[in-house]
Amino acid sequence: MSRAKNRGTGTRAGTRASPSVRTDPLLAAHTIALIGLMGVGKSTVGRRLARRIGLPFFDADSEIEAAAGLSVADIFAAYGEAEFRAGEARVIRRLVEGPPHVLATGGGAVLNPETLALLRERTIMVWLKADLEVVSGRVARRDTRPLLRGRDPLETLRQMAQARYPIYEQAHVTVETGQGTHQEAVEAIIEAVLAHLNDRTDKDRPEKNRPTRP
């Protein structure tokens, strides 16, 4: 089951959500940026989320590959991680400065302070978080991730988590995906993002215009 947290409040998504498009002015007005470690499902869940709320979907790694004419693995091999991160930052800025959409970022994108600041300012950042053992089992089945080649997946993920979790914690919303379905993760994201946006709207509203709650 997926669990969503917004400012420390835990919520749980239902398991029988309709797959139809959910049109909501608040959702449609914002870019939703998914962050988190490799293998947590950012791209898969992001595509489903985009269809669910009627927004375009972009995968940062795919956009980088299209711009460079090379795969991520080939960029790492030919130019190194530093050059990849520079291109990643340029691509994410271009996307974020465009119309609202759902964006799946690379796991290390927010290590760039400028990218982190941009995403915090211009998007709703959602940290997809899952148990490292679960993630390790997923990524071990693929040999396309440069940072895992020749290394123990679980130990590498633990090292990444130690370095990156303090940065991921700056997201506006955290969704714990666990071993739930992708659709459960989508519904949890929608619930948590709407709660965050409504909370922000209430805080921005003048005190005298806020509705009286029983």
Image: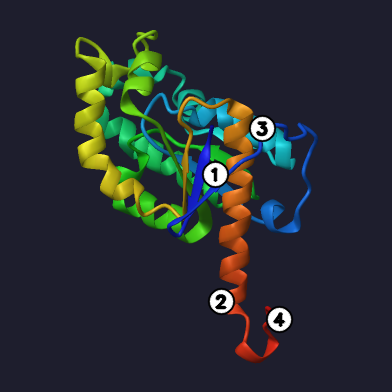
Q: Is residue 154 above or below residue 63?
A: above
Mark 4 falls on what kind of element? loop
User: Label 2 belongs to which residue?
Assistant: 203
Q: Is residue 177 above or below residue 79?
A: below
Mark 2 falls on what kind of element? helix
Q: Residues within 10 Å of mark 2 (few under 14, many from 20)?
A: few
Mark 3 falls on what kind of element? loop
The disc labelled 1 sits on which kind of residue?
Answer: Leu
**x and y percent of residue 109 in the render?**
36, 40
45 relative to 159 in the view: left or right: right
- What's the distance in space between the residues labelled 4 and 1, CA to CA? 36 Å
Of pointers 3 and 2, the one earlier in the residue sequence: 3
| Residue at figure coordinates x 40%, y 32% from the top left | 130
**x and y percent of residue 16 in the render?**
72, 32
196 relative to 157 in the view: left or right: right
User: Label 4 belongs to which residue?
Assistant: 211
The label nearer to you, 3 versus 4, is 3
User: Label 1 belongs to which residue?
Assistant: 95
Q: Residues within 10 Å of mark 3 (few under 14, many from 20)?
A: some
- What's the distance in space between the residues labelled 2 and 1, CA to CA? 28 Å
- What's the distance in space between the residues labelled 3 and 4, CA to CA? 32 Å
The label nearer to you, 4 versus 1, is 4
| Residue at figure coordinates x 51%, y 58% from the top left | 122
User: Label 3 belongs to which residue?
Assistant: 15
**x and y percent of residue 157 in the render?**
26, 26
Of pointers 2 and 1, the one earlier in the residue sequence: 1
The label nearer to you, 2 versus 1, is 2
The disc labelled 2 sits on which kind of residue?
Answer: Lys
Of pointers 2 and 4, the one earlier in the residue sequence: 2
| Residue at figure coordinates x 71%, y 81% from the top left | 211
Kindly check if marks 4 and 1 are in contact, taking CB atoms under 8 A apart as contact: no
Q: Is residue 92 visible?
A: yes
